[in-house]
């Protein structure tokens, strides 16, 4: 059996970190099994769906390295929904209901007031043909409900949550279609999962009760259901469901210099028993992915953990994978020199600026200037071909008796105008003889 998963966003906004995690897990599970990963655009709601968000979803998935094997759009599949709908109406599993929203709200209130669950009373099922004809005559268009079978408990073995049990008698028959003919999410999703041969539905635990309803839809359509994995939701670093998570988009990550590999590495592992590790390549994440590792507790997403992970990813990136994001002229040696000091690839440009100059070193006191004058002098008679930094500091140590910070810091400050940074043994050859002598001389005031 080929494993088929799907990621089914509604194109009503940008993907946020929660959606991205769902997409990643679906993608990983398909890859684990040599299966297929589909992108299903849930755009039945024409008023709220926007083409620019469809584009953004594709771009974001591509940036994350989660390209789908195929893409389908619900808006192109209405004929199929219509056909299945008609069959379910004919079979008595979908029925028309004529209550207004105000009437439904009132019924709910009354039940809640009596301390009872606000389950729809199925009044529409008791209408006679005459009642219905009267509504139609009055121009009242029905909405449509799926009739749950009450005499069979709903059960499934969730790949993350374990055995699940729902009593359908405690649930309202879900509205599947509005009076204007438009579709609600529930039925088209079940139809597509059947039609596209989806074997595993991986989604957030906010969909658990939808699954209970959809299981009866699969059954009513004569299909065996896919397996389900409902993941605990993401919370912010402080452990609460946070609004901020909803605004953390791929755009945001890109803007602050986060690598796709960092996003993948974090989102593949938080909420699981596996350690969060910086994986540039996706294969280790595929190899270790399994629903058995997932816990029931909410997964904590911490932006500072992502930044830390990002730095550890950047430290592993080779020149070829970043060269088109580096400033023009920046060499492989320069990348290798500055890489351990970066939190993001973008910061490499700052260090390239330091290497190329000009730099504005601090003002030094007389004693330090005298020391730097000796440094400029030593730099003139240095062998610049080998290891100029060790040659320079070795000569100065001998000439001045300085050591440690007193020996190194003024040189670093004069040469880079920074108090810290990459290994000077790698940086000095990049600054080169001419610029180094000039910087030391300027700092010495000579
Ligand atoms: N469009 C639905 C959502 O974003 C899809 C849910 C599902 O995976 O079935 O919530």
Image: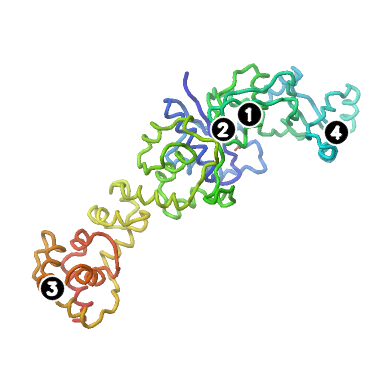
Residue beneath disc 3: 401
Q: Quadrant of ligand 1?
A: top right
* Colour scheme employed for the rendering of this structure: rainbow
Secondary structure found at label 3: loop
Residue 390's spot in the image, x, y percent? 14, 62
Discs 3/2, front: 3
Q: Residues within 10 Å of mark 2 (few under 14, many from 20)?
A: many
Which secondary structure, mark 4?
Answer: loop
Give the CA distance from mark 1 to mark 3: 76 Å
Q: Is mark 1 within 8 Å of ligand 1?
A: no
Look at the picture and state if 275 lies above or below 85.
below
Q: Which residue is mark 1?
A: 211
Distance (Cα) linking label 3 and label 2:
67 Å
Say which label, 4 or 1, has the lower sequence index.
4
Q: Nearer the observer, disc 1 or disc 3?
A: 3
Horizontal side of 9 relative to 363 (left or right) equals right
Label 1 near label 2: C-beta < 8 Å?
Answer: yes
């Amino acid at each position: 059996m080929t494993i088929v998963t799907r990621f089914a966003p509604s194109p009503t906004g940008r993907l946020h970190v929660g959606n991205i995690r769902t997409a990643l897990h679906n993608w990983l599970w398909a890859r684990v099994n040599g299966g297929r990963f589909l992108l299903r655009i849930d755009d039945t709601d024409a008023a709220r769906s926007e083409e620019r968000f469809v584009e953004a979803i594709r771009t974001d998935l591509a940036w994350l390295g989660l390209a789908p094997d195929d893409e389908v759009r619900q808006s192109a599949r209405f004929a199929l929904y219509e056909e299945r709908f008609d069959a379910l109406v004919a079979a008595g599993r979908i029925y028309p209901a004529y209550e207004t929203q105000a009437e439904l709200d009132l019924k709910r209130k009354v039940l809640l007031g009596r301390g009872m669950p606000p389950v729809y009373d199925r009044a529409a099922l008791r209408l006679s043909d005459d009642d219905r004809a009267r509504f139609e005559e009055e121009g009242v268009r029905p909405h449509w409900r799926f009739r749950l079978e009450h005499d069979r408990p709903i059960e499934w073995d969730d790949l993350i949550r374990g055995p699940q049990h729902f009593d359908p008698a405690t649930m309202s028959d879900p509205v599947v279609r509005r009076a204007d003919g438009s579709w609600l999410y529930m039925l088209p999703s079940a139809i597509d999962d059947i039609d596209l041969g989806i074997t595993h539905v991986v989604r957030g635990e906010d969909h658990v009760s939808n699954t209970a309803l959809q299981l009866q839809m699969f059954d009513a359509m004569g299909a065996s259901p896919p397996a389900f994995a409902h993941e605990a939701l993401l919370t912010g670093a402080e452990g609460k469901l946070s609004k901020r998570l909803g605004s953390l988009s791929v755009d945001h990550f890109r803007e602050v210099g986060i690598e796709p590999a960092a996003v993948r590495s974090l989102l593949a592992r938080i909420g699981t028993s596996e350690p969060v590790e910086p994986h540039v390549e996706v294969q280790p994440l595929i190899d270790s992915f399994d629903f058995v590792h997932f816990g029931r507790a909410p997964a904590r997403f911490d932006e500072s953990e992502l930044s830390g992970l990002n730095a550890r990813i950047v430290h592993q990136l080779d020149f070829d994978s970043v060269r088109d994001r580096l400033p023009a002229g920046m060499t492989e040696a320069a990348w290798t020199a500055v890489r351990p000091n970066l939190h993001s690839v973008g910061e490499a440009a700052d260090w390239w600026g330091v290497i190329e100059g000009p730099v504005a070193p601090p003002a030094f006191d007389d004693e330090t200037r005298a020391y730097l004058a000796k440094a400029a002098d030593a730099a003139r008679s240095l062998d610049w071909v080998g290891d100029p930094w060790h040659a320079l500091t070795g000569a100065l140590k001998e000439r001045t008796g300085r050591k440690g910070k007193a020996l190194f810091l003024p040189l670093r400050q004069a040469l880079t105008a920074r108090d810290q940074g990459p290994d000077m043994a790698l940086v000095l050859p990049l600054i080169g003889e001419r610029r180094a002598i000039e910087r030391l001389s300027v700092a010495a005031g000579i």
